[in-house]
């Protein structure tokens, strides 16, 4: 059995810890209130106080308390005798003052921001910038050294923590969960993560449930159930709970420190023991058991050490401590006096020297160098990021002897390549998904790896093992949170998901995209790997699930975020999907959304053609066009695998029935190419766009998703008024693939009708052909209703010989 | 103490129960496979089998088992001695065959769909339509009698169940949760709901965790942790667990029925006792305790009673039973023989008479009339819906002596009216929100009611009681799920939420909107009350939270759904908000999204003007226009409170500096008015639109959200190419209100510059004015950076005397 990680705390240590904690609290209050007189070297005057008081005090002293006690167990050289690193995930990220203060105390803040040095001037700058126009945000935002988790929107702390822990065996992730956040669905589902983390190969997450009892204006649920119930719940989540309650009824903080030090020693000792036992099991070739990892429940008063009462109402220990306890410190002398008394209660004169620097004996309490939680490279993942070793994707392509050959399932082809990606990158590449890796036809990755799972594994389970590169849990939020945490700490991965249900993470995507956007302006934040989605089982092939599983709108949602961050690709076949994904896995700091079907479909481009087409992102398909370099009569645009099939089929019908019509087919892989170059870095210039879509000819565009998105992307284009888009318009049910496209007027026959209706003169001259196309729709519909399947000629359609008879 | 709800089951009863269960299973398999020969009166031939086999068998026998045993405890006249109603919420809604089968057995299906009678012909129709083009969906979709929950997307069953239970004291809601669904965040967070349901005034939810062990291709987490852990978890959620395991290793079903009947008797008896005790406490004036309500854990094999093995691989009790266990029954004679054997194992000849009707002695097993779970009016809420008694909102308006008076906080005014709505509708109106009722300034509703909470209530808690109309939990998914369940069972309510975080329920909104869209084509589904959002704490006033809390994109998301369902309103002040909300609470079958700020702002319209303006939804504000009925030189459009303020201020600047310019201000309350009348029922005709926005004059439009939405709505309009939109473009941080609009170029000065740049000739003639406006921006920015607050003249801005000096 391994030795305990730390020795019992000495009283002198705890005195230093307390001083360090007081300093952090002092700096936190100063950030919320002051713009001058930071060391209170003169009496507090109205002009020292900020005119707008913004910040969240309530959670702050708990965060600083935890940081201080973690610093004690980490020690000068890193936790677990110098072997380990530690990362602090601040669920209640609204307590920004706390984590900014600790980073400043540890020196990291001044290293990252030289204009905020560790002296009185720096302290004034530190205070003045907080929540101040032109300054820094009030949360544990990207600007904060040591943060991978803003904690602005609540719910994702624990998922991020586990994401950070995967494949980081020496990392301890202390994850603070507020009792408000504890109520969210995302957090509630994240407790399952301990059934997926490997006790030897991955790091340890220490969840800390900080029960200060109140939200903005209300008590929390967790604080108002019997403790036995709460502990049952945590045990039921597979944890061993430790409880520390302190600071109530004026309890002396020294006593709380002593108890907390004892609990932290127990916890860290237990973690070391559990990991050692698991390592022994692994070494002995036994099955590694899932340990009951510690969880800490910390009960302290909300706004601890702050004003007990303001204007006769309780503040400390109540929801009134949530934001700014003293609201009128600029105008109300009583409030200001109370603020001064509050700040002086931390005895700043004992903490900071003449220059305003933290006294060296207190500063020495913190860990050194990268062992400081504020300075760990894990919180600036780009510092640790290594390029993936990517196999040559062109070797995995499918043979396309002629356009329309196949059918081949695109994601299955991608799966074979991903298997090789997994093999070559066994430690820093993971695939997340909600039990859909096989359903999405990526099953070949299971030739190279397994699903990782630390619950019970039984005979008959397939591709499931204690360690593996695939993480599957029926929880899109957890998949997303894991991947975010994994990427933010310097690794790579992808999230494959049913297209419709990716909306479950809309709000998480928002937060991640905003994080990435903010990082672009923070020079010390090194680029991280892009967040890659593979959306499959898409709207057009929900044959057995129908309407509830049909929603292609994630793309619309994504495109509301900064163009510097978001990329959307719709590869029409297997080779283009390979080329696209190879590109995505090489990019940094983006969110790449790739939509691709899993069902066998026709293949259009050889690998060489696919690479060239994907490099351009958009292009004319010459074999499907007969404009021969001249101005066409009509342009057929398409984006997405099913729309491309229908557009090519429409071209083939046009060529048969209206051979004199000059048709151009333009396929779009990179949706951003449609946009104006002033709007998106991938955008085409007007000249290029006009070269493809003409300035005045009708354009019939078959699009994978909601049709108005194409209008939104192209509304500034010269020819916009002639662009007519077909796409998904919320007409769906449980039916056959071709019936689905008919329901939404995206089918080949309707596209031909659209062409006839839009090319001047055709409707009059070719009324019979138009009627024939509508009759074809009726024929197909009738066949489907009678036989429950698509008519054979639309089901197995391939590119016909244009000069030959109709297939 | 009350008597047990039921007497011990007699063996003959259980024989009938088993027959009923076999019938339900037979009909389920028939739906998945057959298009003819429903009663197997001839040997099964290829042409009897559907060409495309679509459906989910795995969960189905568990659902039918539960339905049968619930029917037993409900009895002929309703559960609890005829006093109670029961509702079945099918979390694993993919098991559509089960709930369709039970509805047919109970006769409800044929009552709702007369072309599917209770005879052989009806059975053939029942089988043929399932998952067949032109038929019915494969889930517990709106088409299914007795369903309020499709269960297509997983996670919302328990929240819906509690929503149904609120204010329905006699209702028992049996809520089946699949062990896949159990992994989702939404479900995990829903366990908290028992801390909000009142044990006397509300109904009882019986959660049933159906552990069949597998998802699509993988085991479930809950099935692979020790049972002690699972039970700790459920105890930790405040429940008393009951466990039934049966059907494994070929166990005789009669034995399972007997055990299950015993468990169900215990559970229903316990529920009756707990409710009686709570009623006694209430009567005695004691504090009503939160009971530990029963939860049932049911372990049965996945695909129970189906094929044990297919092609040498285990099916029953494995993930291979998830969908269609025998895939080739049309072409593979062995598979077809196995199917026939499987179906005959239910002994259909014992179950159905010569005509194909369920034998009367078996049919008599089900409850009667509306006590049938398939026929309960609670599952067709419109049948129970009563209009709200709405107080005259005009009496709650604010006095607006002149445009720009105030400032007044719009949501606070709404709160006073909502308090009266609550008073007048004490049993069927609820307000849901994530701890933000007060933060969103609706605190006056607490004059009329409290937050309902059955956790511990302490001295010092404000507006919190055992019973109340407000439900607050920091879980947007639970708020949304509760409200959906409440509306679907025939009541009214609203969900108030921070604007940015409503994205957490994007996917839930999708499902509800799709449900409503499907109901439009189901004549027996009576209209239900609309789902009303109040989005506040919006993007422009996130002074202390900044970038992470800024996202106005929910409107964009909503507008992807059917125009018949969605409505979006942006009232610019308090009186228009009142008028808008009064309208919303009167509507049916819509989703109404109302965005309104909580911060004090200028008021524009008297109550009479507000009513007229909201009735039109869009209109010229004459006092802010000087076009005097002529064609203007420029139109300023605006939608949203902050953009309206900036647009009016811009008009005022223009009137001062360019008095000769004919300016028209058009304010939009109902965003759908911008759309083409062919696209949305509220859409303006082109003539009306042109009348407001002209056919060729520049339009500068100040919009609350992402600017491209206005383009998407107006791209077909004659004058579209002259419409220039300012809105939120993801430029945000922690800063002052005016700095936020400047960051996004939505401020008054920039709008004036936009006008100068777009009205022909102005830019050249008024270059100095243009520069002055840009300098004004710099002045404001400098003031803010220096003083941390907005310059006074933009902060307290009111509509000035146009002829007077600049304020």
Image: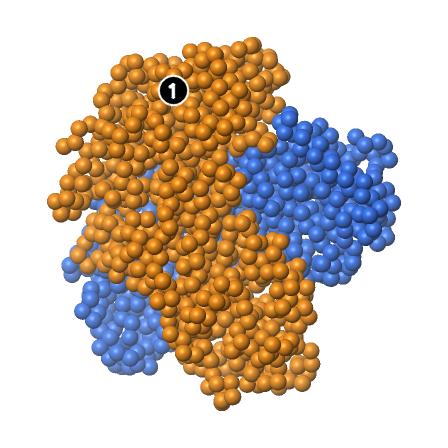
Chain colours: A blue, B orange
Q: Tell me the residue at 78%/59% (across/down).
A: A695
Q: How many marks?
A: 1
Callout 1 secondary element = helix
Residue at the (73%, 30%) spot, across then down: A793
Q: Quadrant of the C terminus of chain A?
A: top right
Query: From this viewpoint, which residue is outermost toward the bottom?
Result: B805
Q: Is residue B413 above or below residue B473?
A: below
Write down the chain letter for disc 1. B
Q: Horizontal and vertical percent for residue A113?
A: 45, 68
Quadrant assignment, res A133: bottom left
Left or right: residue B625 versus residue A107 is right
Residue shown at the point (35%, 44%) measured from the top left: B163
- The image quadrant that residue A61 belongs to is bottom left
Q: Residues within 10 Å of mark 1 (few under 14, many from 20)?
A: some
Instruction: Please tell me whether residue A482 is drawn above or below residue B444 in the rendered image.
Output: above
Residue placed under numbered mark 1 in the picture:
B363
Residue closer to the observer: B195 or A769 = A769
- Judging depth in this view, the residue of B517 and B442 nearest the camera is B517
Image location of residue A706, percent across then percent down = 61, 49
Q: Is residue B524 visible?
A: yes
Left or right: residue A746 compared with residue A629: left
Residue B504, visible in the rendered structure: no
Q: Give percent across and percent down for residue A318.
A: 23, 60
Counting from the top left corner in percent of width and height, residue A698 is at: 76, 53
Instruction: Specify the quadrant that holds the N terminus of chain A.
Output: top left
Q: Quadrant of residue B189?
A: top left
In-front residue for pair A496/A271: A496
**Residue at 67% from the left image edge and 30% from the top image edge:** A782
């Amino acid at each position: 059995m391994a030795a305990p990680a730390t020795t019992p705390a000495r009283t002198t240590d705890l005195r230093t810890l307390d001083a360090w904690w007081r300093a952090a609290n002092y700096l936190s209050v100063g950030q919320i209130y002051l713009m001058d007189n930071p060391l209170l070297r003169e009496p507090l005057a109205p002009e020292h106080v900020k005119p707008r008081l913004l910040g969240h005090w309530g959670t702050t002293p708990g965060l600083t308390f935890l940081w201080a006690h973690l610093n004690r167990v980490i020690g000068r050289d890193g936790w677990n005798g110098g072997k380990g690193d530690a990362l602090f995930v601040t669920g209640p990220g609204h307590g920004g003052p706390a984590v900014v203060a600790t980073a400043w105390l540890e020196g990291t803040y001044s290293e990252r921001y030289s204009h905020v040095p560790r002296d009185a001037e720096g302290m004034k700058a530190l205070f003045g910038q907080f929540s101040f126009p032109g300054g820094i945000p009030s949360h544990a935002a990207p600007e904060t050294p040591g943060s991978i988790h803003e904690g602005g929107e609540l719910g994702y702390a624990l998922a991020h923590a586990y994401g950070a822990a995967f494949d980081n065996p020496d990392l301890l992730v202390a994850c603070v969960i507020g009792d408000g956040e504890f109520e969210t669905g995302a957090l509630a589902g994240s407790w399952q993560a301990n059934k997926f983390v490997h006790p030897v190969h991955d790091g340890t997450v220490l969840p800390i449930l900080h029960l200060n009892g109140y939200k903005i204006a209300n008590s929390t649920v967790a604080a108002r159930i019997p403790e036995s119930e709460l502990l049952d719940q945590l045990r039921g989540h597979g944890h061993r709970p430790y409880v520390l309650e302190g600071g109530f009824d004026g309890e002396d903080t020294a006593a709380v420190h002593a108890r907390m030090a004892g609990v932290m020693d127990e916890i860290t000792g237990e973690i070391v023991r559990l990991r050692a036992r698991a390592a022994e099991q692994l070494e002995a070739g036994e099955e590694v058991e899932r340990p009951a990892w510690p969880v800490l429940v910390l009960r302290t008063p909300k706004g601890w050490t702050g004003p007990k009462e303001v204007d006769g109402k309780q503040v400390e220990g109540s929801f009134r401590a949530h934001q700014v306890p003293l609201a009128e410190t600029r105008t109300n002398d009583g409030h200001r006096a109370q603020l001064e008394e509050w700040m002086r209660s931390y005895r700043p004169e004992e903490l900071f020297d003449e220059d305003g620097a933290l006294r060296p004996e207190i500063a020495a309490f913190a860990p050194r160098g990268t062992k400081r939680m504020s300075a760990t490279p894990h919180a600036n993942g780009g510092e640790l990021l290594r390029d993936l070793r990517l196999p040559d994707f062109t070797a995995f392509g499918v043979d396309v002897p002629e356009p329309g050959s196949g059918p081949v399932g695109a994601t299955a082809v991608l799966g074979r390549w991903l298997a090789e990606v997994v093999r070559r990158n066994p430690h820093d590449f993971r695939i997340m998904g909600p039990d859909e890796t096989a359903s999405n036809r990526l099953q070949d990755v299971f030739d190279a790896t397994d699903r990782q799972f630390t619950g019970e594994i039984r005979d008959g389970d397939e591709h499931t093992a204690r360690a593996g590169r695939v993480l599957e849990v029926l929880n899109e939020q957890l998949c997303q949170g894991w991947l975010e945490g994994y990427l933010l700490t310097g690794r790579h991965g992808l999230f494959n998901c049913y297209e419709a249900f990716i909306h479950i993470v809309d709000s998480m995507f928002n937060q991640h995209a905003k994080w990435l956007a903010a990082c672009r302006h923070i020079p010390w934040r090194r680029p991280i790997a892009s967040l890659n989605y593979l959306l499959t089982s898409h709207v057009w092939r929900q044959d057995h699930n129908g309407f509830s599983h049909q929603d292609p709108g994630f793309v619309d949602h994504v495109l509301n975020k900064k163009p510097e961050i978001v990329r959307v690709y719709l590869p029409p076949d297997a080779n283009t999907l390979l080329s696209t994904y190879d590109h995505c896995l090489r990019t940094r700091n983006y969110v790449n959304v790739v939509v691709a079907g899993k069902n066998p479909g026709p293949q259009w481009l050889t690998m060489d053609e696919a690479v060239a087409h994907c490099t351009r992102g958009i292009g004319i398909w010459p074999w499907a066009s007969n404009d021969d370099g001249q101005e066409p009569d009509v342009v057929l645009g398409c984006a997405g695998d099913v729309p491309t099939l229908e557009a090519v089929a429409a071209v083939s019908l046009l060529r048969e029935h209206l051979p004199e019509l000059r048709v151009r087919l333009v396929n779009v892989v990179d949706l951003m190419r449609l946009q104006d170059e002033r709007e998106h870095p991938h955008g085409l210039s007007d000249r290029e766009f006009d070269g493809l879509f003409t300035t005045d000819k009708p354009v019939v565009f078959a699009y994978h998703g909601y049709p108005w998105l194409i209008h939104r992307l192209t509304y500034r284009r010269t020819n916009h008024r002639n662009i007519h888009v077909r796409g998904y318009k919320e007409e769906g049910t449980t039916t056959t693939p071709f019936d689905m496209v008919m329901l939404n007027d995206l089918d080949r026959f309707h596209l031909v009708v659209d062409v006839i209706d839009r090319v001047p003169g055709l409707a009059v001259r070719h009324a019979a052909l138009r009627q024939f196309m509508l009759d074809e729709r009726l024929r197909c519909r009738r066949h489907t209703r009678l036989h429950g399947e698509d008519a054979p000629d639309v089901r197995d359609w391939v590119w016909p010989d244009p000069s030959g008879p109709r297939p």
